[in-house]
Each structure stands twice: as structure tokens, then as C-alpha cells.
Image (cartoon, helix red, strand yellow):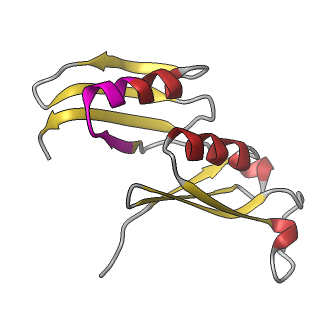
Amino acid sequence: MSQLNAYVFFDGNCAEAMQFYEKLLNGKLNIVKVKDAPEPVQGAPNPNAVLHSRLEFGGNVLLASDWLAPERYPGKQGFRVSLLADSAAEAKRLFDTLSKGGSVQVPLTKTFFAEAFAMITDRFGTPWILRGGQSMP
């Protein structure tokens, strides 16, 4: 069976962001840094940069790494990571935590398709869509 997982690139703060998400989502995180790679990584100026990370939570997987050429980091644009909470209360907890130090594009609100819906960008620059409670697929 094929899988589809989001892979997010960070501008040097991948380890901090993924550790934050690990706690937020009660997951299990595995991080490999450039200095820990089994072979030298060409063009990676920072040995502490994250070469690859994998966060597993609730049957889901979020993958991420640092952009290894920081001078050419393109930013995060044209996508959002979608997170579906079990309830509106859980969506509120996620919203409160992810929006702290970030920016809110759509405040947490009830819609015709979800008891709770929001669009935010967290303090690490990751754009999120949150939904909670009963919703359309």
C-alpha cells in the first residue's frame, strides 16, 4: 500500500520545531543530524543541521529536515499541513499552542463543515489548517 506523508523543510530550526510537535501531538520522534549520517553529506555546512526526522503520532507521520543550503532556503509557501482533531476542544488546545508566537490567518470558529476550524502559521513558519469535531471529509 502506498503512503502519503507531508515533508516540511526548515531554515535551521527543524530539531526545535519537531521536538515541539512531538510534545504537542504526543508522538515519537527520530532525528538524524548531518554529523550522524553514515556517509559525508556534500554541501551541508552545518553538522548539527537535521538531515532527516520522522514524527509518528496517532497512526500519522510527519517528516522534516533543515534546508541544507541556508542561503537558498525558499521558505514555506503554497501548502498547509492539515490536522484533524478528535473534538472541538482538542482543536482549541492545538490552536492555542500552535498560534502562540505565530500568526492567525483564520481564527478558530465553527463552520458548516467543522465544529472548529482555523488557519494559522506557527512560530516556526509552518502553515496549518486545523479542524475539529464533526466535519465533511
Q: Quadrant of residue 46?
A: bottom right
Locate residue 19 relative to residue 59 in the image: left or right.
right
| Residue 43 seen from this side | no
Residue 40 location in percent, x, y? Answer: 87, 79
Residue 21 location in percent, x, y? Answer: 56, 43
| In this view, 21 is above or below 1 | above
Residue at far front of view = 26
User: Which image quarter holds the N terminus?
Assistant: bottom left
| Residue 44 seen from this side | yes
Magenta span? 82-92
Residue 43 location in percent, x, y? Answer: 84, 68
Residue 96 lies within the magenta run? no
Figure disc tally: 0
Q: Residue at x 43, y 36 (%)?
A: 128
Q: Quadrant of residue 3?
A: bottom left
Residue 44 location in percent, x, y? Answer: 84, 64
Q: Quadrant of residue 33?
A: bottom right
| In this view, 18 is above or below 52 | above
Locate residue 62 relative to residue 53 in the image: left or right.
left
User: Along the line of sight, which residue is nearer the eye, 6 or 43?
Assistant: 6
Q: Residue at x 84, y 71 (%)?
A: 36
Locate residue 109 relative to residue 106 in the image: left or right.
left
| In this view, 109 is above or below 21 | above
Q: Residue at x 34, y 34 (%)?
A: 130
Q: Residue at x 79, y 48 (%)?
A: 71
